[in-house]
Amino acid sequence: MTNVLLIVFIISLVYLGIANRLLTFITIIAFQSFILFWVTLLELHDMSTGNLVFILIETIVFKTVAVPAFLVHLIKKNKMTRDAEPFLHNFTSLMSITCIIVATIVLSYYISDTFIKKIYFVVALSTLFIGLFIIATRSKIITHVMGYLIIENGVFVLSIAVGNEMPMLLNMGIMLDIFASVLILGIFLNKIGNVIKDADVHQLRHLKD
């Protein structure tokens, strides 16, 4: 069952690569967090109850509900257009993401570690690179925030692979990292929304002290 959920997670990454709407990005990111909730529930059965509950709250309350709602609020407040405005065509993005996934599968074949399942390694590494790819190929700053959240999901997947030994301190560090990044970038978007009409990275060149 866990493998099926991770495969669905990979498919959602492929769909992210060809998505052109900001609300689609937010919906998929929330869906990925929901998948991580079930993967965590099925995989980390040997953890303490308190630690497990903390992770579940992190995936459902914070990553599935709070962060997507916050991103939607930013889009509406700054009156952003609904398009993600990618630099590449959908076909090019699809082929690039497919190559990334295939490359991680090939790389995992040559890496043997008894402590980490290969499917976790493939999903985590693919998520990291696809998050970077989305940041590099989208013009809106809000999509860069989403790309960072996708990268964090990759780190979280890798953490689940060794989750039975993952201390509470690491969980708090992950959650604090997400909260700080979204909050800071949210404030940043709110500020530049008063200066420029649309949060496009190209327009940052015209900002002056």
Image: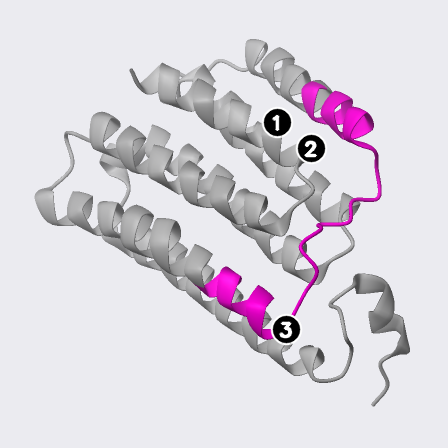
The one of 30 and 103 positioned closer to us in this rendering: 30
| Residue picked out by circle 3 | 78
Q: What residue type is labelled 1?
A: Val
Q: Which element carries disc 1, helix, strand or loop?
A: helix
Marks 1/3 in contact by CB < 8 Å: the verdict is: no
- Label at residue 128: none
Q: Residue furthest bottom?
A: 209
Q: At x 29% / y 56%, what residue is drawn?
A: 169
Label 1 sits on residue: 14
Q: What element carries label 2?
A: helix
Q: Crowdedness of circle 1 by 10 Å Cα count: few (<14), some, many (20+)? A: many
Q: Quadrant of the N terminus?
A: top left
Residue type at numbered disc 2: Ile
On the picture, is 32 further left or further right than 101?
left
Find the distance from the CA under tag 1 to the CA under tag 2. Answer: 7 Å
Residue 71 drawn above or below residue 22:
below
Range drawn in magenta: 70-98
Q: Can residue 120 be seen in this view?
A: no
Q: Earlier in the sequence, mark 1 or mark 3?
A: 1
Which image quadrant for residue 137? top right
Report the residue at 57% width, 74% height from top. 77
Give how far across and how far down residue 139 sits, in percent: 78, 54
Q: Is residue 103 visible?
A: yes
115 or 47: nearer the viewer: 47
Query: Which residue, given by chain and number where applicable, does mark 2 sit on?
Result: 18
